[in-house]
Amino acid sequence: MKFFSFWRSLASFRVRIALNLKNLPTEVVFVDLDADAHRADDYRRVNPQMALPSLVLDDGTVLFQSLAILEYLEETHPAPPLLPADPRGRARVRGLSQMVACEGHPLLVPRVRRYLDHELNLRDAQQAAWRRHWTVETLAALEGHLTGHNATGRFCHGDAPTIADICMVGHVTAAINQPIDLAIYPTVKRIHETAMAMPEFARAHPSMQPDTPEAMRPKKA
Ligand SMILES: N[C@@H](CCC(=O)N[C@@H](CS)C(=O)NCC(=O)O)C(=O)O
């Protein structure tokens, strides 16, 4: 499989985690969002939406949209499971995932930021306020659903990672980068720390990719 990815892309981060958990090797093609490589013909031919990630199967089938890719990986490589066995649990995990992937994250992506900047002429402080507002809304929604719920365990749903954790860690990464203090979201913070302690999550982090700029890598002691 060929995986089109960018180090900073949170949607790519999701798929990287699932590929690691399911131990699926891919050839990675780096598409530099900062250089607008996703808008060039080469990538537009792969994914006319001009968004990352895309996963191209060995027969040439192109998969796009991270949640659809995660569901495909789950259906074709069920171990370890990233969705609970029961329909109610699956609905809860999908709901938590969609809060991030369908509501919080889309408001933070480069094409939206570009529109705020170029078309609405919002300056840095206003753009930062926009990002903060939508990031905090999603953090609060996640915390509200997770805290005190009897299905919440070490992870968002039970004691093993699911697609909900995969989505949540990306959102928390965006929050940490702004920076937003996680102290008032204790359940989100605890689960994020638990998940990021797993090598499959840690290796997928934006700061650890081959295309991560040196300045964005963890500082050596
Ligand atoms: N809902 C999509 C989001 C895709 C998306 O917007 N990806 C970002 C990077 S995280 C991107 O490529 N953005 C390009 C742009 O906004 O111009 C998914 O989950 O795959």
Image (cartoon, helix red, strand yellow):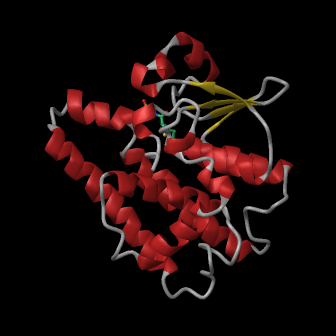
Q: Which residue shows up at 50% across the image and 53% down it?
A: 170
Return the residue nearer the eye: 217 or 221: 221
Q: Is residue 30 above or below residue 99?
A: above
Q: Is residue 94 above or below residue 10?
A: below
- Label count reads 0
Q: Name the quadrant containing residue 66.
A: top right
Q: Name the quadrant containing residue 195.
A: bottom right
Q: In this rendering, would 192 be left or right of 15?
A: left
Q: In this rendering, would 79 be left or right of 136?
A: right
Q: Name the quadrant containing residue 175.
A: bottom left
Q: Which residue shows up at 14% across the image and 37% down it?
A: 123
Q: Position of residue 35 (x, y in %)?
A: 42, 19
Q: Which residue shows up at 58% across the image and 12% down it?
A: 42
The residue lying furthest to the top in this view is: 41
Q: Is residue 148 above or below residue 72?
A: below
Q: Position of residue 183 (x, y in %)?
A: 34, 75
Return the residue nearer the eye: 102 or 201: 201
- The quadrant of the image that shows the N terminus is top right
Q: In this rendering, would 116 be left or right of 103?
A: left
Q: Which residue shows up at 76% across the image and 33% down it?
A: 26
Q: Position of residue 128 (x, y in %)?
A: 22, 47
Q: Position of residue 179 (x, y in %)?
A: 30, 56
